[in-house]
Amino acid sequence: MSTISASSLPLLLVRDLSHRYGAIAVLQGLSLAVAPGEVICLAGPSGCGKSTLLRLIAGLEPVQAGSIEIDGRTLASPGIHLAPERREVGMVFQDLALFPHLSALENAAFGLGGLARSERTAAALRMLERVGLADRAAELPHRLSGGQQQRVALARALVTKPRLLLLDEPFSSLDVGTRRQMQREATDLLKSNGITTLLVTHDPEEAMMMADRVALMEAGRIAQLGTPAELYGNPADGYVASFFGEVNRMAGIVAGGAIATPLGPIAAPALSEGARADIRIRPEAILPAAPDARIATAARVTAARLLGGSALLEILVENGSSQGTALQMRLTSREMVEAGAVIRVSLDPRGVFVFPA
Ligand SMILES: Nc1ncnc2c1ncn2[C@@H]1O[C@H](COP(=O)(O)OP(=O)(O)OP(=O)(O)O)[C@@H](O)[C@H]1O
């Protein structure tokens, strides 16, 4: 699958990037085009190469194979290495590395070395205002909360007006409430200022909330690049389908255009007759059946957990063997059913995916 989009001229163009650390191939021919003003989330499991990609774009390491361009100008390729400070790329990494002995204002002004002192102060103060911290400008970092320190780091990265902003898990050390608030605020800030951004995250919800497009990586490649809705509703394979949380898995063989499963037949129009299929069903796609549902399956609830807004049920459906098939379904908390109940369930095809095995 090509990961370079043919639409508007990209601001950032990564072409066929490969990178090794000794025997480990960390990036394997990765290509990515980011449009001006676009926020792209790089997601994927630990070790898949997300931070390495960011480090290469920032210029913290030389490129071994492939190239990196901004606005058509090559910043890095084998033999070419523009110094990090000349790339006009801003960075906020997980360990914010604020200077502990400098105030919020002095931290925010740090990148403005070339300007007169009064201009630096004015620009840094304007940026602290934009992130809602002007009233804490004189404070040292350790007197600020995690979220406030995060805002100082964002201000410091944005004050130099970078052409591209790189964020490497910037919110991962914050508690959930502050993290969600920072995600909203940062998205507003990036979008209202049209800042082209690459953001690394482990958190599917963060990717869904902040990204125009998500690049889901797997072992040094992009498994799928698309809008959050595309990745959720039309995953390219089982790996992508599983990114948003645990899914139910079943296997089967196509017969008469469908696969017989304990939840009834599942259509498999893309697979040939007799093919082995790998079926993924989102827990939220197993629904309590409507009274007039044409296809519904009896299920015994073996465990039920209330998770706040939603509830997770473990259910057992008959499959012709004595054990039955164990599945997970997700309900709203209002639909909560107690363990031991027998219910009827049906499938929402929008959360059912069939791939070749
Ligand atoms: N400087 C280095 N020297 C040797 N190996 C490295 C170096 N930096 C990273 N690696 C290895 O390269 C692989 C990819 O690392 P990278 O940090 O890019 O992954 P990641 O997707 O960002 O992971 P995480 O989400 O855990 O940060 C890992 O196996 C890592 O151990």
Image: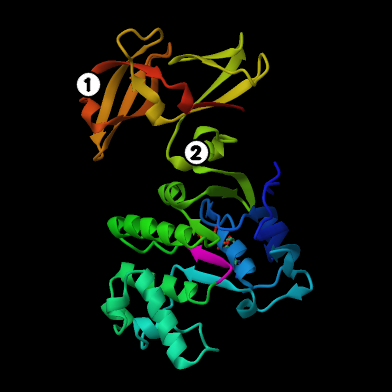
Q: Residue at x 53, y 43 (%)?
A: 227
Instruction: Inspect this view and state whether residue 95 appears.
Output: no
Q: Residues within 10 Å of mark 2 (few under 14, many from 20)?
A: few
Where on the picture, by quarter, is residue 135? bottom left
Q: Residue at x 43, y 40 (%)?
A: 245
Image quarter in which the C terminus is found: top right
Q: Is residue 75 left or right of residue 105?
A: right
Residue, far bottom: 117
Q: What's drawn in magenta, residue-wise?
A: 162-168
Q: Position of residue 113 (x, y in %)?
A: 52, 88
Taken as a whole, is the magenta stretch helix, strand or loop? strand
> Vertical placement of 55 versus 333: above or below?
below
The numbered disc on residue 340 is 1
Task: Identify which amino acid the numbered label 2 is placed on.
Answer: Ala
The numbered disc on residue 229 is 2
Indicate the colouring scheme: rainbow
Q: Is mark 1 within 8 Å of ligand 1?
A: no
**Magenta includes 163?**
yes
* Quadrant of picture, ligand 1: bottom right
Where on the picture, by quarter, is residue 329? top left
Q: Is residue 224 left or right of residue 102?
A: right
